[in-house]
Image (spheres, helix red, strand yellow):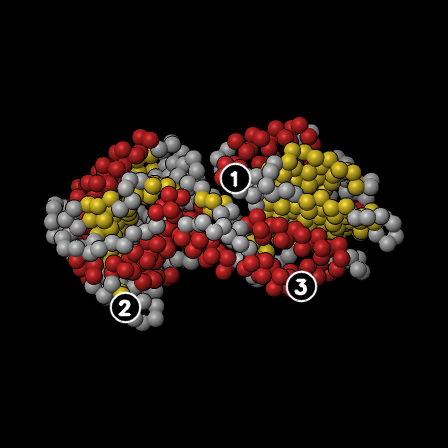
Amino acid sequence: MPYIATANRKTPALLIYLLDCSGSMNEPDIKLADGSSATRMSVALKAIEDIIIRMIQLSTRGTAISPRYRIGVFAYTSQVIDILGGIKSIDEVAQLGIPDLEAQNLTNTEAAFLKAEQVLQAEIPRLDPGSPAPLICHMTDGEITMGGDPSPVAERIMQMAVPDGRVLIENIFVGPSAHLLRHPTIEAKDWSGLTSSDELVDEYARRLFNMSSPLPDGYRTVMHEMGYRGLQAGARMMFAGNDQALLKMAFAMSSATPTR
Amino acid sequence: MKNLCFIADQTCEAPVQRQTLGSVRLRSVFSRSSDAQLLGQPGQDHFQVVFGESGSHQSKIAFAVCDGVGSSFMGDLGARLLSKALCYALWSILSAPPPTKSAQIVVGLTDFLDKFVPNSTRAVMEFALPDKLPALTRRALDEQRAYGSEAMFVCGMLLNGCWTFAWLGDARLQILDEHLCAVEGVSAIPDTNNRWSSSRGARGVVQAHVFRAKSAQAIKHILAFSDGLASVETQLASMSDEAINAEVARLTLSTTSDDISLLHFML
């Protein structure tokens, strides 16, 4: 599978964000560059806004925006909430803005992936054959407290394909990386990525790892161009950490569909 | 004799146009990308040609073709600022005395572009965005504004029978003899990493070549163009006006088409 299709007006990249909005997202344990800390939710929202800004910058012609990306944002707790009201093109997202999200109690990850599967089933038949493989970017901060294991749904999604390749899934764990990784990430720009489940501490981490697609070379090249030069071939699309720089890197990957 | 100036109009398409500049014939083309046409936005290429007489009453020409970088702030602005600045530099500064070595052009142009930074920075900072932009779009553009506007270029000058060329980044230059074979001496290798920046001047090393009067006699065609024509660059010199227009129309049909600009000097 090549993953070389470029995102443009005729073949926009389809990106679906699944955002865990459980109560623990209000934990103020994310380290900021200035040494202070902020809640997981606020930092995640800032990272999403930053990446939307980047997609707008990659799509501008003068002051107009070419619909190079199509985006869906789904927040989940005990239920799944469609934040944008369907899949919207990047020019529409620029108009709508990024709404504030409120953290609530439970975590039903399976419901979120079922929603993503439903959206993909509707969207993939309508995609131009030259479109980039769709990408699901899932952000979570912890254990599932409601619903079943999302792994089977994620496995089905990763079997869905367009000519450019199978649907990609990226997982971002927001929280202390020591909860998942044997060797916590130190410096985002130099991080080599996760290439083996041996680097993970428990079954939950391994489940996220197995739900994460291998990083396509084209994405790795774009990430290198963005300054994330440490990522190795064979790394999974999985990040874990409570550092703002790492979260920024993680969300940057969701916009790394080649554009030229 | 009053100087003549030909400037691309970035807001519309211009099929092949022909001009006579003394003994030199010029044909030019300008076309916006399909995205720019669809969105009603200006093209991000720009060219300018200045023609007049030197003190010794010989033809004097300065030209520049610039390709604005799409991911920078308003690439059309960068291309426009740069092509005008390059023509001014060639016409008014670097021609007195006329350069005899490429190193003179490299140093002179790099120095000029460094000194141009305050002006180009001010032009970028003062560029007025529409009032009714969505907040996210405005933030995206303001971030780009802080970074600056960028463009790649190829430029040249005819003075006292000598041709001088300079380039930076992925702007294309062909110098051909009467058989449409490349005249030795110039090796313009496109490099997308190098460019001019409104906030930093030349990023990368400016390349240059000077053909003195004797060696310049072999030059019969000079083609300066943007990478929007890269797919047909080997045929460009021999293509008829109609064929070029047809090719531009064909290229523009693609949703991924780039802006197109061409200056073809026939000596």
The residue drawn where x is 19% and y is 40% is: A114
Real-space Cα separation, disc 3 to disc 2, in angstroms = 46 Å
Residue type at numbered disc 1: Gly
Q: Does label 1 or label 3 sit earlier along the sequence? A: 1
The residue drawn where x is 47% and y is 44% is: A64
Instruction: Kindly state the secondary structure of the residue where label 3 is placed.
Output: helix
- Chain to which the residue tagged by mark 1 belongs: B
Residue type at numbered disc 3: Asp
Q: Quadrant of the C terminus of chain B?
A: top right
Mark 2 or mark 1, whichever is nearer to me: 1
Q: Are marks 1 and 3 on the same chain?
A: yes
- What residue would you read off at disc 1? B40
Q: Is residue A97 left or right of residue A80?
A: right
Q: Is residue A208 left or right of residue A59?
A: left
Instruction: Kindly state the secondary structure of the residue where label 2 is placed.
Output: strand
- What residue would you read off at disc 3? B111
Of residues A186 and A243, which is closer to you in this image? A243
Horizontal and vertical percent for residue B1? Answer: 84, 48
Mark 3 or mark 2, whichever is nearer to me: 2
Real-space Cα separation, disc 2 to disc 1, in angstroms = 44 Å
Q: Which mark is residue A243?
A: none
Residue type at numbered disc 2: Ser
Question: Could you tell me if the residues under marks 1 and 3 are in contact, i.e. CB atoms within 8 Å?
Answer: no
Horizontal and vertical percent for residue B127? Answer: 55, 55
Q: Which mark is residue A37?
A: 2
The residue drawn where x is 56% and y is 58% is: B126
Q: Does the rendering let one see residue B25?
A: yes
Q: Are marks 3 and 2 on the same chain?
A: no
